[in-house]
């Protein structure tokens, strides 16, 4: 067993038979790993934190859809699909709000896909989902 890293929870990452192995606290190999770690001392480093994976288009789509649905819920509708279904409502207020929502929703998605295309083309930095949502123009209710 060759120790590679220690972890904050007291476990270790080791190489056993040429393969990486997680030696958990209380496991049968833990005592051996713990003794080896004592001998290595401060030279045994903590396992590096992996870089987060870049967001995918699906990640952005999910965040945008949550934002769209939250906007519909602000008017007491279940979600965006439900609100859009009121575009031909016999209640004039619901119809007007639904039509404004649909126009805003369409503008949101047009903006989102245009900006995501810029990210994919290397024309702009990839934002966090939160920063991207903050770029979306708020809805103007009638």
Image: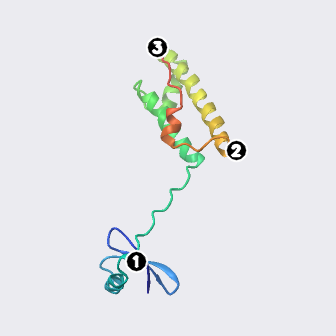
- SS at circle 1: helix
Residue on which the image places disc 2: 121
Report the disc number at residue 136. none
Residue 88 lies in quadrant: top right
> Which percent across, then down, holds residue 50?
49, 62
Residue receiving disc 1? 43
Residue 31 position in % (x across, y down): 31, 85
Q: Earlier in the sequence, mark 3 or mark 2?
A: 3
Residue 139, percent from left and from top = 50, 23
Q: Nearer the viewer, residue 112 or 79?
A: 112
Please state if 38 lies on the left or on the right of 20 as rendered. left
Q: Residue furthest top?
A: 92
**Could you give the CA–CA distance between mark 3 and mark 2, rounded to whole angstroms?**
42 Å
Q: In this view of the protein, can residue 17 be seen by the observer?
A: yes
Dot 2: element: loop
Distance Cα–Cα, label 1 vs label 3? 69 Å
The mark that comes first in sequence, 1 or 3, is: 1
Q: Nearer the viewer, residue 36 or 90?
A: 36
Q: Is residue 17 left or right of residue 35?
A: right
């Amino acid at each position: 067993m060759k120790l590679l890293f220690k972890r904050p929870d007291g476990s270790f990452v080791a190489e056993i038979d040429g393969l990486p192995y997680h030696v958990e606290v209380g496991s049968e190999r833990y005592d051996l790993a713990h003794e080896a770690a004592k001998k290595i001392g401060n030279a045994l480093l903590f396992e590096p934190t992996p870089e987060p994976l870049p967001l995918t288009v699906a990640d952005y789509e999910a965040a945008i859809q949550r934002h769209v649905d939250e906007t519909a819920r602000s008017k007491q509708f279940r979600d965006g699909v439900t609100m859009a279904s009121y575009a031909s409502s016999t209640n004039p207020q619901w119809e007007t709000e639904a039509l404004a929502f649909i126009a805003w929703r369409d503008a949101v998605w047009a903006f989102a896909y245009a900006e995501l295309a810029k990210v994919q083309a290397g024309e702009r930095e990839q934002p966090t989902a939160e920063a991207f949502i903050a770029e979306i123009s708020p809805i103007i209710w009638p």
